[in-house]
Amino acid sequence: MEVVFQQRVAVIMIRTMRALSFAWISATLVTACGSVVDPPDGEVSISPRMPKTMDDLVASSTSDDDRLSFQWTKSGAVRTDLFENTVDAALTTKGDVWRVDLVTDTGVSVSSDEVTIVNSAPATPVLTFTPAGPLFEGASIVCSVTTPEPDADGDPVTYLANWSKNNTPLVGATMTAFAGDTVPGAQVALNDIFVCTVSASDGADASVAAVHSAMTTCLAPAALTATLAANGSGPTGTLQMFTVPTSVCRLRIEAAGAVGGDNNGVAGSVNGASMNGTFDVTPGSMLKVLVGQPAGPGAIGTQNLSGGGGTFVLTAADAPLIIAGGGGSHFAANPAVAETVGRVETSGGTVGTTVRADNGMGGNVEATSTSGAGGGLLTSGAGVGGGRGFTQGGTGGAVPTTETAVGGYGGGGARGGSFGQGAGGGYSGGSCGDTSGTWVGCGGGGSFNSGTAQVNTAGSNPAAGYVRISW
């Protein structure tokens, strides 16, 4: 029995060895023949899960097998032009169904994922109040969308405004451009605080709300007026200061330049300019005011052949608001013309071939002339009797001779001798031609106006200058 058992064990061991040897040989043969033992596999997904039209689609795979690639499909149509793992947002549209497959090199899909492009909410609007400047009591306030952004999906966008006044919801808003955007003036009082909240909707989703707020800081116009008259005498005067009243944010300013000089029988024919405009100002701020004086007196009778002073209104930082040119001068044999009166243009007047002054400069004269040019905002006039510019003090020209005629305060040029005459002061000074034998006269001063609702008139003021400020 023992011999038989040993024989059976030996047979089993021989058979086992043969089986293992056959398996090794078979495996060696399969590998040698180049067959794929393990097929490629992996999982694919798309992010974001709820994409909008401005989102790129990004596919991610759990496999790094280079035998696999991405295949994109848009609403059932294979996109053969897309090979990477990303689809640019510019290729997507709301409602598209995008699918990505992880495919083998023979086109067999081992995994897929898909997403639908959902609606994009409109962009948050950018708001401002109209008027964009200070808010006045009694004046309507409009909450305006300054730059409407197009909807990313091309949907029409509507706006809705909600207001609060002094932290309390406001009712009674009306429509100017869209629903509820306007607070009627009857509900606007001094020191009220208004908050406007606006959201944009494309019919499906609303934007993040935009908020804009401001306080009513300005009084309504009260028809009050202050008049600043010329002071000093002849070529001299004093700079005056005007303080903007509390809660006053807008002024109406009228400035007139002084009349220029003439000889017997032609008084008033070289008038100063009149300039008028509306200006937004800061309550409590200061304005500098120089009011022009008339030309003269002359040393010979009534021959006040010199220039009238310009009238200047500037901020405390010397930024010009409004400037009115003074009149120039002329002799009876040469009647006043547009060049010799106070001008509404920024350039000063000129007679003959003398170069005209502009850009705030003082005027020019002929090389051998005894005339004095008008002073400008920035520089003084040329010639022996040139008027001083505003920044040089604004004194009128004055030459101590027996035939002089002083220029008016405000840069008026002086007659500096026989046959000489003077030009008007202003934003740019007037210039003088050859007066040595022809008595052709000198130009009026130029003017400047940075206000709105302007009313400007050349050669309209036959007397001393003035400034009227209304609010």
Image (cartoon, grey):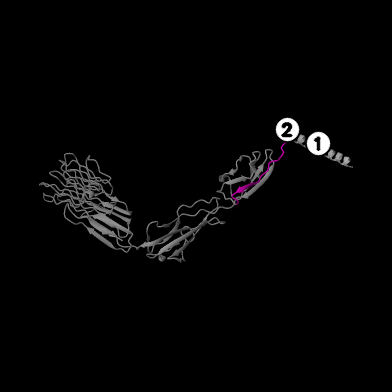
Q: Nearer the viewer, mark 1 or mark 2?
A: 1
Amino acid type for the residue under numbered disc 2? Ala
User: Does residue 42 show up magenta in the picture?
Assistant: yes
Reply above or below: 396 against 248: above
| Residue 227 x, y percent position in the rendering | 24, 60
Please state the extent of the stretch shown in magenta in the rendering.
Answer: 29-49
| Residue 445 x, y percent position in the rendering | 24, 48
Split into 4 quadrants, where in the image is the N terminus?
top right
Q: Earlier in the sequence, mark 1 or mark 2?
A: 1
Instruction: For residue 31, say whether it is visible.
Output: yes
Circle 1 residue: 18
User: Does residue 152 show up magenta in the picture?
Assistant: no
- Quarter of the image where one finds residue 100: top right
| Residue 337 x, y percent position in the rendering | 23, 46
**Count of marks overlaid on the render:** 2
Circle 2 residue: 32
- Residue at mark 1 to residue at mark 2: CA–CA distance: 21 Å
Specify the farthest residue to the left.
402
Dot 2, how many residues are within 10 Å of its Cα: few (below 14), some (14-19), or many (20+)?
few
Reply above or below: 105 against 463: above
Which is nearer the eye, 245 or 368? Answer: 245
Secondary element at image label 1: helix
| Residue 395 left/right relative to 144 | left
Split into 4 quadrants, where in the image is the C terminus?
bottom left
Tell me the chief SS of the magenta region: loop
